[in-house]
Amino acid sequence: MFMHRYFIIYKPYHVLTQFSSEDRKTTLKEHFNVPKDVYPVGRLDYDSEGLLILTNDASLNHRLLNPQYKHEREYWVQVEGSITKQAIDDLRKGVVISIDGKQHKTLPCKAYSFTEPPTVFERHPPIRFRKNIPVSWISLTLIEGKNRQVRRMTAKVGFPTLRLIRYRIQKLTLADMRPGEMKELTKEEIYEALFT
């Protein structure tokens, strides 16, 4: 009997969001053992980390990727430099970025800077430390997902992204998870977290 399966994973840094390899890059297959018909919903760039949903439920895939549902995705972003209030305000209001050669004004979003860095796992390899250049951590919560949007947004306001972790999708979070870890959820658990 066919069963829908639902997993949340903490995708490590430098892992492709797919199960087949390209250019000998590490894929999800090296880290997560799931049935052959289970695939990622959406994507996280090779150089980004964090929360990803894997499923064989096509209707969940459709609902999560459909812009009309406006699902919140929260990112914890380490940026180069001491982030300013003006930059945070600009991010909140939306900035103009280039996507595939076209200008795109990002939708208003939630943005704030952390007063203390969030508790995150060390990255391997670590961010290159430069004594003379400060860094800041910010939280960005978006309801759209253009290609490399967060990186383009922080660069636009003058604070390039050094590290990017997707912490939350709606009510699902990385709480208590380590990079490379996976949890299986029931249909009820995942639908409640995403759609209620």
Image (cartoon, rainbow, N blue to C red):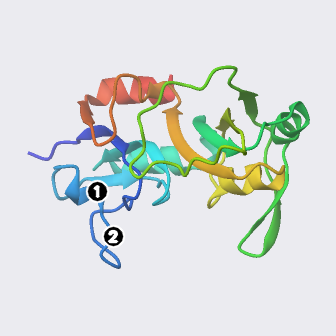
Q: Within the image, what quadrant is residue 53 found in?
A: top left
Mark 2 lies on residue: 25
The quarter of the picture where residue 140 lies is top right
Locate residue 196 relative to residue 99 in the image: left or right: left
Q: Is residue 60 visible?
A: yes
Q: Is residue 102 above or below residue 191?
A: below
Alpha-carbon span between mark 1 and mark 2: 10 Å
**Residue drawn at x 75%, y 51% as measured from the top left:** 153
Under mark 1, the amino acid is Leu
Q: Few, some or many C-alpha atoms within 10 Å of disc 1 (few <14, some 14-19, many ≥20)?
A: many
Which residue in the rendered view is the most extreme toward the right? 86
Q: Is residue 112 above or below residue 27?
A: above
**How many C-alpha atoms fall within 10 Å of the one at disc 2: few (<14), some, or many (≥20)?**
few
- The extreme bottom residue here reads 23
Q: Amino acid at mark 2?
A: Lys
Which mark, by number, is residue 28?
1
Query: As rendered, which of 14 and 1 lies closer to the eye?
Result: 14
Which residue occupies 87% across, 34% down? 89
